[in-house]
Image (cartoon, rainbow, N blue to C red):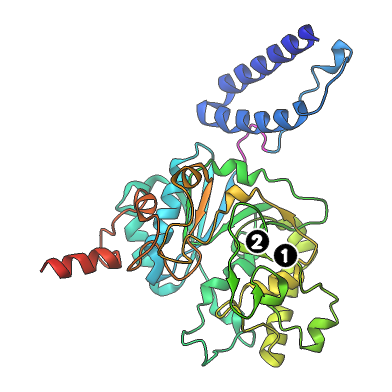
Amino acid sequence: MRFQLFAKGLIWQKMLHEIRGQRGASVSYCYLLTLQQTRASEDSAIVGLQPIDFIPNAPRPVVDWRQEEIPVVIAASEDRLGGTIAAINSIQHNTRCNVIFYIVTLNGTADHLRSWLSSSTLKSIRYKIVIFDTKLLEGKVKEDPDQGESIKPLTFARFYLPILVPSAKKAIYMDDDIIVQGDILALYNTPLKPGHAAAFSEDCDSASTKVIIRGAGNQYNYIGYLDYKKERIRKLSMKASTCSFNPGVFVANLTEWKRQNITNQLEKWMRLNVEEGLYSRTLAGSITTPPLLIVFYQQHSTIDPMWNVRHLGSSAGKRYSPQFVKAAKLLHWNGHFKPWGRTASYTDVWEKWYIPDPTGKFSLIRRHMEISNIK
């Protein structure tokens, strides 16, 4: 048994040496990390006694040593542009892998975004600015006078991933109110079950504390997002108590997404909601989550909960210990209290990755208020 482990170790060392010699340090790191993840899952089981010719069968890597691109899709709206910059900066600084950012924005923000990137330490990142066509949403969304805020087109960009990254087979989508503290490769390597087009973090996981909405029960159930009084919803036979998932961070198998026509399915439910009002009013403002919950009902894989530690924006108070925040792979300020706003939690963690706008158009609201008070 000891001889087997020794021989196996030599083989891994030889593979690493070959990779370093052929592909360079950056590729070696990414490839080795993938191999280590695969090896860890294999070695967690009892190997038992095997013939010596069993050992050289190295695990097939998820990412090959040609260093596959890791596409990361993120939206960039004018009033939240600082969030996008901080998110990109945190991702880039915590990996040595070949990340390419697909930054989805509107025409009026593109020049501002280019200026910010080109005049900062992010000028060397690989990115593509993708202009979102708002005509895609015609007939699929409508203004709700009770909401008080206008529809934000970029919140629907996640529905159109195959259009935004047409050549990719797999991609990561992330909201702009996040900070990444782990290596994005680990999230990219999330295994998706056969037939699943996406992997999400479920709202009932242990990493995020549950919040109860007064008079509405647990907000992390399907009933919090969909109106079960409507016959069309009831006909779907989805359990109202089913745990929902958070669509702010997910990994997508775009080959499967296209095969199942996921975008068309989402658009169908968007249209039906315009006609019939299928979404629940319990969670005000949530118009992107309901169609995803319907389309992916019991048909999605899960990501590690530490890759979407959320609710940091639910209040200005601190709900997690400093040790837990430090251990999180991804922090998500979903909620009204954004880290660039007047007041928020864990702003020191977020500001570590924020790069001030060289054009001066975007500034932290609380900093602006502090300066005004001094004057």
| Residue 170 visible in rendering | yes
> Which residue is more in the foreground, 261 or 46?
46
Q: Is residue 3 above or below residue 328?
A: above
Tell me if residue 67 is in the magenta stretch: yes
Report the predominant secondary structure element of the magenta stretch: loop
Mark 2–mark 1 contact, CB under 8 Å? Answer: yes
Q: Categorize mark 2 by other alpha carbons within 10 Å: few (<14), some (14-19), many (20+).
A: many
- Under mark 2, the amino acid is Asp
Badge number at residue 63: none
Q: Mark 1 belongs to which amino acid?
A: Cys
- Indicate the position of residue 202 as horizontal and vertical percent values: 68, 59
Disc 2: which residue: 203
**Label ID, residue 243:** 1
Task: Name above or below for residue 60 compared with residue 238.
Answer: above
User: Percent from the top left, x then y, of residue 192?
Assistant: 75, 50
Residue in the image at 64% along x and 52% along y: 206
Span highlighted in magenta in the image: 63-68
Q: Quadrant of the N terminus?
A: top right
**Label 1 neighbour load within 10 Å: few <14, some 14-19, many 20+:** many
